[in-house]
Structure formats: structure tokens, C-alpha cells
Image: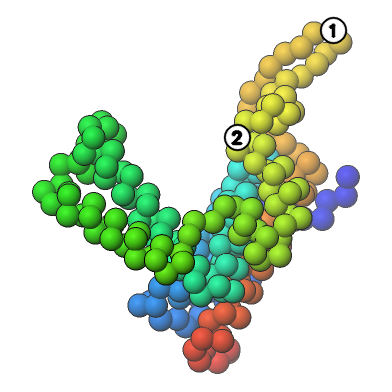
Amino acid sequence: MTIHINAEELEKVVLEECVPVLEHLRFEPSYWRHQLIMSMACTVVETAHAVVLLAIHKKGYEANLLARKVLEGMVEVKMLAQCPEYVGTMRLADASYWLKQLQEGVDGNPYTAALGKIENVEEVIEEHKKLIDELKSQGTRRMTAFEKFEQVGLKNEYQTVYRNLSGDVHGRLDALIKRHVVEKGDSVGVVAFTETSIEEMQATLLGVRNWVRETTQVTKAFLESEMPQPESN
């Protein structure tokens, strides 16, 4: 198999191509949309660099777990750039999450017991309920991963690339067998800590390279359309 990219080359893309662009972008931190798109772009480049470290140590299956996160992050950035109302969708998801955690604490769940003991916990719960009702009254709703991919024109990527990477994340049968089961003659064994060659990681590394680049480009284009940017040296 031809090697089109190695770990070191991906690291250069992340650290020398993408990070400098994000570092010099001007944005307004008090704007939800600016704050969230920059935060998500930073998450994408950080996660892409983690893929580099795993690839160096020949951990291809583990790299796939984070590659999916990079792809998801790129979709989030595209949603924020293309859909002003998506900020509301993110706020609804966040408020719904914390409402459940707070209620679990009040109901005695030992893992969220500290939340249940907040002095004004009932008031905080009501605030979250009020925000949820307010957002829903504006037509805001939760979105599935498929809906997001479809919204940004990546339906095919969801049906193939994303689903393939999800096999390693969720321990799908075929992914488990490929990763751990080996056949030698008439015998079958299970192995752990399998190393993955750079040739076997080509699809993952090329995907991460493309997604981190696109994330950076979309973030840059969005912020340039929103406010004046410093001149390049």
C-alpha cells in the first residue's frame, strides 16, 4: 500500500498550518457564535494532534476513536458557520443535560449527589426548565448526528465514514473481531495491544488531515465575514 501521509506530516499540518491561522483570528468572545466556533475549532486541532501521537505509537484503532471526534467537530463548526440558530440548539442540549444531572442529584443518584445538595438547587432547576421552554417556544429543537451531517451536505460521509469509525467507538461485532480475533490454522485466539502499521492508518490520517484543514478554513472564512481581521505579515 502506498503511503500518502505519515504521522509527522499530519503533525505539521496541525501545528504549522492550522494552529497559526486560528491563533491570529480576531473574534468577539462575548458573542455566543464566535465563542463556540473558536472553541470547537480549537478542540478539533487538539484532537487531531492526539491522533498524531497515537499514530506514532502505532495505535490505529485508538486513533479511529479520536478521528470520529475530529469529524464530528468539523460538522459542528460547519453548523455554527452556516446556521445562526444552531447556537440555540447547542444551548438547548446543554440545558437539557444539566437539568437531568441536577434532577438525578435531587433524586439521590450517588454520582451527582453534590449537585443535589446545592443550596438553591430547586431554583437552578427551574431556571434550566425556563430556558428550555423559552428555546422550544422559539422553534429550537435537538438534532441527531445524521441531521447535522445532512444539513452541511455530508450525508454520504455519515452513512460510510462516520459509521465505519463508530464501529470502533461502540465495539461493533465486526470491529471487535478485526481488532482482537486471529486465526491460525484451525485455532482461534484473542489478542490485545495490537500494533497498526502506518499503511493501515492511511484512511484515518488522510481523513483527519482533510477535516482539520476544512475546520480551520471554515472558521477563518466565517470570522472574516463577521469582523475585520488583522493583516497577514
- Of the residues under marks 2 and 1, which one precedes in the sequence? 2
**Residue pointed to by mark 2:** 170
Residue most extreme to the front = 137
Q: Is residue 133 left or right of residue 93?
A: left
Which residue type does callout 2 highlight? His
Name the foreground residue: 132 vs 38: 132
How crowded is the residue under tag 2: few (<14 C-alpha within 10 Å), some, or many (20+)? Answer: few
Q: Is residue 82 visible?
A: yes
- Residue 206 location, quadrant: bottom right
Residue lying at 72% horizontally and 57% vertically, measured from the top left: 155
> Up-down: is 95 above or below 106?
below
Q: Which mark is residue 186?
A: 1
Q: Residue at x 39, y 56 (%)?
A: 94
The image's colour scheme reads: rainbow
Place of residue 146 in the rendered image (x, y in percent of width and height, measured from the top left): 64, 53
Task: Name which residue lies at 73% across and 20% down.
Answer: 181
Q: Is residue 184 left or right of residue 123?
A: right
Closest to the observer: 193 or 177? Answer: 177
Between residue 55 and residue 132, name the one nearer to us. Answer: 132
Which residue is most to the top? 186
